[in-house]
Image (tube, helix red, strand yellow):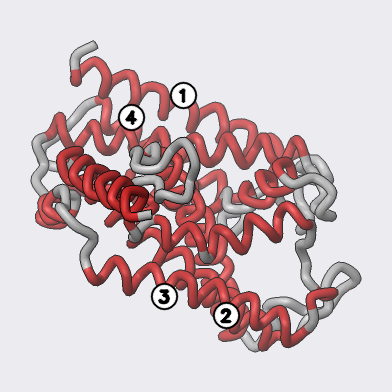
Amino acid sequence: MSPSEQHHVLARTALVWALTYGAMRTYWQLHGSPSHLSAIGTDLVVFTGWWGIALCGAAAVLAAAMLRPSRRFALPVLIGATAVALALVAASVMLVLDLIGNVFPGMGIDRYPLGAASRVACAVGGVLLALAARSFRQQSGIRLRVLDRLQIVLTPLDRTPRWAYVAAYVSMAGCLTRIAAQAVVGFDESPLSGIAFEGCFVLAGTLLPLALVHSWGMVWPRWVVGLAGRRVPRRLVLWPGVGVSVMIVTYFGVMLGQMVVERLHGRNPFPPDARMDLPETFFWVAVPAYVVWGAALGVTALSYHRRTRSPEGVESLAGGMGRASSSSRLDA
């Protein structure tokens, strides 16, 4: 399939999605949406009701515009499609809770199959529109300085830079700050609990950012029997780093924005209820800590991506560690 054909397939798919999902949301708006779509009632956040329908309408118009490219309006269409794609993903952020509830059952997170399906559809639409926008930019030949600079940022690295180490420890500090905030109010008051989840939570906030910058995240250390000196599978470290970063920044970034809006209107963002009764100060410490954790983790994941794009550098690192391991065994 040629790039032009691929572009048209993506744009058409995004258009069909926008019309179909928009029609469903219009039906719900006019005839009443199903109950039990989420713990807060609605399936989406921020863009709810007619705003969600307007978002689908905008996606449809932009997808149709990308089917008939015009040099005159290419840049506004590209900017608009990118903004709407991000809005669709932001509206579906409660998908993070659906994922956690299914991966870690028994945590007290209620399941809402229909609401989860709607959120998946919304997120998929955002991704489709983003891919169509990317293809549209390539077909239109639009040059953006920001994207050109991004290409430079993605060039391979022959070693882990100092800023990556700083980001790793900032990420870990964000996680530890979140744990400290919970310790102040009491771990019995945690909205999420479960041994498996808590174990993964701590590992994602401590071991993962360190693995993304230290050599043992690229080459198995000598104390790993049977694997010492071999390369660590790139996906084993990079994918969790990117995934956790995206989920944390998206979910808690939207939450932080909502908190600011609520407080500017003189309202408590988290009024006590039967499910959770925590002081507002806790959230003003915990939520920004999450955002710092996720954002810094994303920086470390970027450095790991660039570092491991250079096979020669990783191979030389593996060879060096392997020789060091052999030397230590001979010395013993």
**Residue furthest out toward the top:** 1
Name the residue tied to disc 1: 16
Q: Which residue is mark 4?
A: 64
Say above or below: 107 vs 28. below
Q: For the residue marked with disc 1, what is the amino acid? A: Val
Residue 316 % position (x, y): 18, 44
Amino acid type indicated by mark 4: Ala
Residue corresponding to mark 3: 170
Relative to 194, is 280 on the left or the right? left
Q: Amino acid at mark 2?
A: Thr
Can you say whether 287 is above or below 5 in the image? Answer: below
Residue 245 relative to residue 231: left or right: right
Mark earlier in primary sequence (4, 2): 4
Task: Classify mark 1: helix, strand or loop.
Answer: helix
Contact between marks 1 and 4 (CB within 8 A): the answer is no
Q: In x, y percent, where is residue 92?
A: 58, 48
Q: Residue 271, image x and y in percent?
A: 78, 79
Viewer-nearest of labels 4 and 3? Answer: 3
C-alpha distance separating marks 4 and 3: 43 Å
Which is closer to the viewer, label 4 or label 2? 2
Q: Residue at x 57, y 34 (%)?
A: 121
Q: Is residue 79 visible?
A: no
Residue nearer the viewer, 277 or 108: 108
* SS category of the residue bearing label 3: helix
